Every structure is written in C-alpha cells, then in structure tokens.
Amino acid sequence: MGDQVTRKPELAELQFHPARRKAANAVQTLVCLGLVVLAVLLLSLLFGRSGERIAVQMCVNVAAVVALGVFCGNSGIVSFGHGAFMLIGAYLSGILTMPAGLQRTALPMLPDFLAGHELGVWVAMPIVALAGLVFAAATGSAIARLVGASATIATLGLLIITHGVAIGAREITRGSQTFFGVPRITDLGVALGAAVFLIIVARLYRESRWGLSIRAVRDDPSAAIALGINPRRSRFIAWCLSGTMLTLVGALYGHMLGAFSPASFYLPLVFAHVAMMIVGGMYSVSGAVTGVVVITVLQDTIRQAEGGFDLFGVTFPAVFGLTTVALGVAILLIIWLRPQGLVGREELGPGSSSRMFNTIRSGTKRAAAPSIVGDGVLSAEHLFKSFAGVAAVSDVSFKAPTGAVTGLIGPNGAGKSTVVNLLTRAYEADKGAARFENADLLKISREGIARQGVARTFQNLRLFGQLTAYENVLVAAFASGQGAQGAAQIAIRELAAFDLDDMAGTAAESLPYGARKRLEIARCLAQAPSIILLDEPAAGMNPAETEDLADRLSRLGGERGVGMLLIDHDLRFVNRLSSRIVVMNRGQVICEGTPEEIRADPAVIEAYIGRGRTAATAQAAQNQEDEPSRGVVET
Amino acid sequence: MKMRISLLAAASVIALGTSASADDYVVGVMSAQSGYLAPYDQPSYAGFKYCIDKINENGGLNGSIPVKTIVKDTRSDIAEGVKVVQEMIDEGAQFIVASADADPTIAAAQITAADGIPTMTFAGTAPVLTQVGEHVFGSYPADNQQAAVLADYAYGEGLRKVYLVKSPDAAYTLGGPEYFGEAFTALGGEVVGESLYSLNQPDFSAIVTTIKASDPQPDVIVTWAWEPDFPAFIKALRGAGVQTPVMGGDVLDTPTVRGLGEAVDGVIHTSGGYPNEGSKYATFMEEFEAATGTTPDNNYYVNGCDIAHMIEQAVDAAGSTDPAAVSAALAEIEDGEGIMSNFTFKGTDRMPLREVVIAKINADGSKEFIKRELADLDTLPKP
C-alpha cells in the first residue's frame, strides 16, 4: 500500500477513539437531558402553572417512552406490552402507599398480605421495581424467544391478558371500577427526576456491552450468533430492564393520576406512547425524548387554540378535536417524509469522529498480538444435508488444520457455503459429524461454536449496520468474554490491522464495500479464533483489493497461526494462499490435494470446464489462470 | 352541531378573553369533545351552557352572582383530565363539573379534595363515585336506583326468574345487572343464570345458546349492554327464536336502538326522564330547539341544565360561594326543583335520589312511557 506512510498519524489517532466514543456518548446523553430540561423550562416560564402541569405529564411520558425504547429501539421489535407493566406498577404502588383507612373502604376484600402497609412512596418503589422485574422475567422467557411480528403480537397478547386479569381481580383492583385514593406525589421535581434518571439508565444500557449485543442481534441475528451472542438472552435482558423501568413509570403515572382503572393503561395509552416513539425515532434515546417533546408541544399549543381565539381582530371559532387531527397529520407526515422518525437512526449530538473531541488525548493501548494458535484440526466427517429431497451436501469429509489455509472450491451450487453453514450450525446436518479439537460442533449450541474458536464470515456481508466499525469489532471482543478495557484494546488492534483506523467512528452501513469486507474479517479476529471459515471474502473486490486482502490474510496466518478455510471463486486468490485445496462438485468432494495436484486433476477440470474438452483446452484454461490479469472461473 | 360549536366558541372566547371579576362564580367544566365520553359530555355541556346562559341573562345565580365558565376538552383521556382540573383550579374554579364517567370524576375529585371544591359528574351513574369525599356529587339517577326501580317493575309484572347478561369490562355494564339481581332477589325473585360478554364482542350466539338451554327458563333477561353490543345481542337472541322479554339500562334510550325494528319490540328500559306532554321537560325541549337548532334527543341535555339548577339552589341555600358551604348545602337539598325530575341529596350518599322512568320500545321505533318511580332508599342495593 503506497499510502502506508501517510496513514501513520491516523494510526495514532485510533488509540484515542475509545475515549472519544465515551465523550461522545456522554455528550449525547447530555443532549437528551438538555432537551427535556429545556422543554420543561420553556413550558414553565412561558405558561406558568399550567405550563408546569404540561411539563409533569410530558416528563412522565418521556420516562415511559424512553423505557419502552430500551426494548423496542435496541431489539427492533415494537412492543405493545408495556401497558401491562405500567398497570402493575400503578396498582401495586397504589395499594402499598394507600392510607389504611381509605383502603378498608375502597378495597374491603384485599388479601391480607397486601393490606394495610401504608408505605411511603420511596419505600414502595424498590418493591414495585422488584415486582416488575419478576413479571418481566416470567413473560420475557417466552417473548424473548420470538422476533418480528410474532413478538409484537405476543406483546399485544400480554397487554390484553394483563388487562383482563386486572378487570377480573376485583378484590385487588376493584375490577373495571375506578381505583382511587392513590397519593398524588408526582410533581414536577419527581417527574423530571424520574425522566432524567431513566434517560441516563437507557443511555448507559444502550452503549454498554449488553446494549451493543442486542443492537448487533437486531442488525444481523445470524452474524451475532456466529460471534457467540445469544439473541434470546440479549432480548431477555432488554425486556427485563425495559419492563422494570416501565413498572416504575407506571407507579409514577398512577401517583400522577390519583385514580385510574385498567382502561387507563390500555390501548389508547399504549398507542400514544408507541406513536411518540415512532415520531421521534425508535432507535435512539434522543428519538424517544424528541418524540414526546414534539408531540406534547404540538398538542398543547393546538389545545390552547382549540377553544377559539382572536388573532389581529379576526375571531377564530372553537373547533374541538383539532389536537387529535394534528397528531394524526403529524404522524402521517413523519411516516411519509422521515420513516426513521425525526431523529433518524443515530443519537442526536456529535458522533465520536466529531472535531469537538480532537483535544481528547487519553489513549488506549493497542492489545498485544494474540498468542500463536496451537495445533488443531477442524474436520468434517461424512456430512449430509438435503433440502426438500435435493442433496446439497452428500458424504463430505475433509480436514482443515490451524496454522494453514485450506481452500474449498467448486462451481456455483457445489455446496461449499452449505458446508460452512453446517459446520457453524446455521443449518442442521442430516448426518455426519464436525469436530474441532475435542468438541463435536454439531452437538453444542449454535452460539457456542464461537467459543470453541471457530469463527466465520458470510458470503453476503453481514455487518451490524447501525453500529460503528469500532463497535462492530468491540461487540465481538465483548462476546468472547473480554472486559471493557481488554475489548477496547483488541478493537484497536484489529481495526489497525485492517487499515480501518480512520473509519472507526463510521457506521458500518456507510463504509465503502472493500472496507466492509475487511471489517467483517477484523470482527471475527477480535475473538482470537483458532480457525476462521471465510466464505468468499474477495467476492466483489477489484484485483488490487483482492491482492491487498491476500497479503493481509497470509500475514495473519503467519503471525497468529490462525487456520483458515477459504472459499472463493477466485482460483488465483485461493491458489496463492492455500496449502491444500478441497474441491467440491454437486455436493461431493471430488478431489483434495495441493494446488498443483488440484490443477492437474481431470475431475476438477471436468467440473469447471465441462465434459468433452481436450487436455489442450484444459491446459489453455490453466495457463490463463496463471496469467497476472485475473483468473476467475465462472460456470 | 354548528350552533353547538358556536356556543362553545362563545364560551371559550369568554374564558380566554376575560378574567373573572371578584363577584363571578367560576365553574370549571371538563368536557370530552372527542373519545368515548364525547357522546355524553357534549350534550351535557350544551344543556348546561344553555341554562347557565339563561341564569346569567337574569343577573346570575339567584339574580345576583354571575357565573363564569371555564370549559376544557379532556379528549376522554384521564391524564388530560387531571391536567385540566388543576388548570381550572389555578384559574380560580369554585365548582367543578366533571366528565360523565366515574374514572375522570374520581380523579378530578381527588384533586379538588384539598380545597373541598364541590365536584359534580355530568352523568356518571356508578354509585361508588361519591365515595371519594364529602365534596363529590352525582347528578343523574345512579345505576342502583335504576336497577331497583326496574326490578320492582319486573317483579310487579309477575316475572320471577331473571337471566343476567353482563360485561366485567365496564363498571356500568357489570354493575347494572348485579344491582338488578340483588334488588330482584330481595323482592323474592330468582337469578337463574348469568353470562359474561366482552365489550365490542361481535358474536353473541354462544350466550344465546346458553340462555336457550338454561333450565329453568328465565321469565326475563336483563342486560346493561350498550351499543354495539346490545343490537348484536338482541338480534342474535330474537334470531334464535328466543322471545323472552328483555330489559335494560338507560343506554337503550337512543334512536339507534329504537331503530332496530321488530327485534327490539317490547324491550323495556330505564331512563332518567321522559318529556310527558305539558311537562317542564317538554317545554325545555321546545325552547332549547328554538334557541339552538338542535333537538335534545337524549336526557343528557336536560340533565346538564339541571346541574345549573343544582348549583343555583346550593349557592342560594349556602348563602355564600364558599366551597365547603356550597358542598354542605348541596348535600342537604331535599326535593330540589329540576326540569328532568326533582332531586334529593339529603339522606343519600350524594348520588341524588331522582325519579326513574320505565319506558317501552315499540317495533315502529316509538318510545312508550310506562311509569316513573322513586327508588326506596331503605332497600336500595349498596354500592
């Protein structure tokens, strides 16, 4: 690479990235907090007491939508179930804090263990949070198994069931009748404090290892699993945190209303919160905050005008229902013009590559090169796999040792990627075994493969699009069990090794194609694997890029002793790197040997060129392959 | 409709544009202009506004205390309701008229409790709503009064076995039939079966089958179902050939239910009032229609108007506008003069004792007056 020299200063720049990222995260949190505080100040200063009332309601909504976003935003699953948590929080806190005398008349049939506590609100809060956590864990064990629309429908089911149970549990909730006598303690201080607290929790979670993990699962579940991230556990953690937060918000909401019924936590409330979240932008905390602030300001401004007003001597009549109309129009416009919400996919505020953080000079050391991988062999033993009766892989056996590159080639449809998918449990093999060291890869869990030291890349790039390049590598290091410090150092090492240093703060989806390909390899190397299954790493690269990649891979193999199973159509590329090559055709291994042996094998020639060609044609084809231009064999 | 909007406009412009003078009596009105409460709050407010305006034309309450109203939309949202009640108190409200349901009324009453500001629901009928405090009042005959009068009528007609169809989803749809069952059993009748339905349940065939198979067969079916559940239920019931008489609550007093033809022929329901010829109610209807162009086609208009009279009589009896004095005076009113019917708060738990009307729907869509009766306070089912 000719520009190696000019890149040197940037390499140094990379070591500041973790500190810059931290600073950027802190600033982004401050932006969220600033938005809320500013809105509260404006409301209170401009509208006095009635502004304060609006601000209280707004802060409670901010807390609710931010808590909702902890699950929805990070997992990408829209949930309607949060009304259930709010209901539980409101009723439980109400029962625990209600004056005993009032409780005897309002809830005469209350079970003894709930009755007569008359706790202070702040004493009740931990109990409420704990109840929320228990309920979240119980429901999360089922809901975390689901993705997409089925998860959303399950959350809706949770809401409906909880609503029904609340109506049925008349001894505790008074059924559909109004539940009253709840101390009204949610004033502006409490509501703002709660909003600030929950925003900080949500932001810390989002940028933590658990937040990164679930966002990785959201962006690409298959890639996350290949890194050893358990999607269910990630979703479960997000659900539990979100549920616990929402239970607290429900308590606050209950203490704001003073009287409510199960209907107060049902679809109208839930839809209002989801609408706010979608208007602001579901994927970020600042989106949640923005959505609530914008909709509150919009609604309450229009509400003032709703009763009719005089403007420059013209009397406008009262038209009630304007707020609802305006809200509907706003949602329509946003879905049309900005489908990702007002804020978009990223947090408001400067990113880690902003010039604002140029003065940060707190460096993180690059991790030392990992120790040389010891001897080991990945072996496929008599693997079979059919799809709807068509044999994709049939009795495939081969070995790929560490410390060497094993090529796996074959025409399109030969079953190469299927083999990789069988070895990493993306598909279940019909028969056969796959071993690495002493582990039977087909017997352990899918996300356990990575922990055995077997990593992979994907034929069609699978990066975590909304995470930055640095975060892509970082989350992989976390998943391999590194602590915060170690993970940051490793991320720097791998980004530097793949010349991604100046793109550390760029979202993976915005990287150029070549950089994305390199990032995918850097990401799996962050886990210090023993062997990597590279599924067409050079596909789509130009010759110079391919050459560069080959240099890097051979250097890696030399430095770290990582074994590689290399699949590619570019035979020149495979030939250059591999010490042994396995050739597949129509689901079977047809030949195995050194590159020289493979080139001379008639079965290989037949598979690639077709039957009936003369030896001379085959020789010509091979000569062409040896030419410096490019020898891609396409069938 | 247009007239109603301009009425509201007038009210709101006054509310926005003028501040209360020291002599005004400030009444805050929570009125849902959209959402599930709008069908009750809108006519209630229109009637209330009409009569408050008339009172103001004559110099105010008892000719001397002008009323200033602050009206705010709650969109049927309880959190919004809490907010507007606080705003209205900030703006000096001395009396709060709350939306026509228990939830918002109780939420409002808990806020007004601090200053003891009298709080009256537009048309909430759940008898529990006054349990919040001494300052909370109903205005419409409560569910237990309606149920007791209906039970008395049914028993008087020789009916002895009742089948109850109720929904736990709302206090009204659950409470009405339960109060009926209680009163009916106390009279010597028997509840022979019960079915539960969900609000907006599209299909009642399972319940109809259960009723058909019920042994012993009921003499009467009682439900407090409203629209669209009641039409779905009655059509399924009559469609299955069950001709058992059906009785229901005051929600059946609507043109859409009466328009169901043969299916509702003979359905008996309660009501808060009936404009018998030459009655004050009939006069009110004529005057209201002449003044506003809107036909008051339900009782909420006249009940809204009666709230204005309740306030006037309470302020008169209290001799001051002090919230505690007004609350106390209101609670002592006995046989106060109203247009829909007279009202008695004394001796009740502040859900006024008012005459309940029993009416019958005919196949041609007409409503037939049967009787009006006061519930007996001593035998009234307890909330």
Image (cartoon, rainbow, N blue to C red):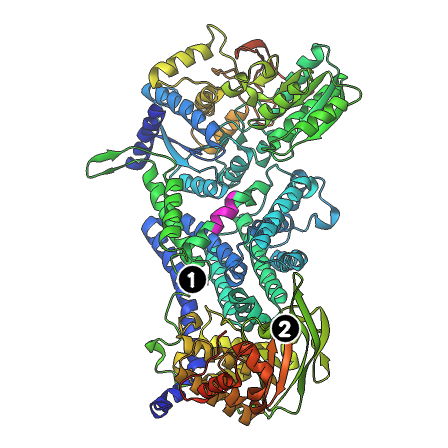
Could you tell me what secondary structure mostly forms the magenta stretch? helix
Residue A282 is situated, as x and y percent measured from the top left of the image, at 46, 58
Disc marking residue A556: none
Q: Residue at x 41, y 75 (%)?
A: A513
User: Is label 2 in a helix, a strand or a loop?
Assistant: loop
Look at the numbered disc 1 and give the secondary structure of its residue. Answer: helix
- Left or right for A289, reference A159: left
Q: Which residue is mark 2?
A: A587
Residue B376 visible? The answer is no
State the image quarter where residue A597 is shown.
bottom right
| Label 1: how many Cα within 10 Å (few below 14, some 14–19, many 20+) | many
* Residue B36 in view here: yes
2 and 1 marks on the same chain: yes
Residue at image point 41% right, 36% down: B73
Q: Are marks 2 and 1 in contact (CB under 8 Å)?
A: no
Q: Say the numbered circle drawn on residue A286.
A: 1
Q: Residue A293, image x and y in percent?
A: 40, 54
* Residue placed most toward the observer, A503 or A635: A635
Q: What chain is tagged by disc 2?
A: A
Q: Tell me how far mark 2 sits from mark 1, CA to CA.
A: 51 Å
Q: Is A269 colored magenta in this rendering?
A: yes
Residue under the image location 36 percent in, 78 percent down: A357
Residue A192, image x, y percentages: 46, 58
Closer-to-camera residue (B146/B320): B146
Q: Position of residue B161 (x, y in %)?
A: 75, 18
List the single residue furthest toward the left: A312
Identity, as a three-letter code, of the amino acid under mark 1: Ser
Q: Earlier in the sequence, mark 2 or mark 1?
A: 1
Q: Is residue B133 above or below residue B222?
A: below
Magenta highlight range: A268-274
Q: Quadrant of the N terminus of chain A?
A: bottom left
Front-lying residue, B10 or B313: B10
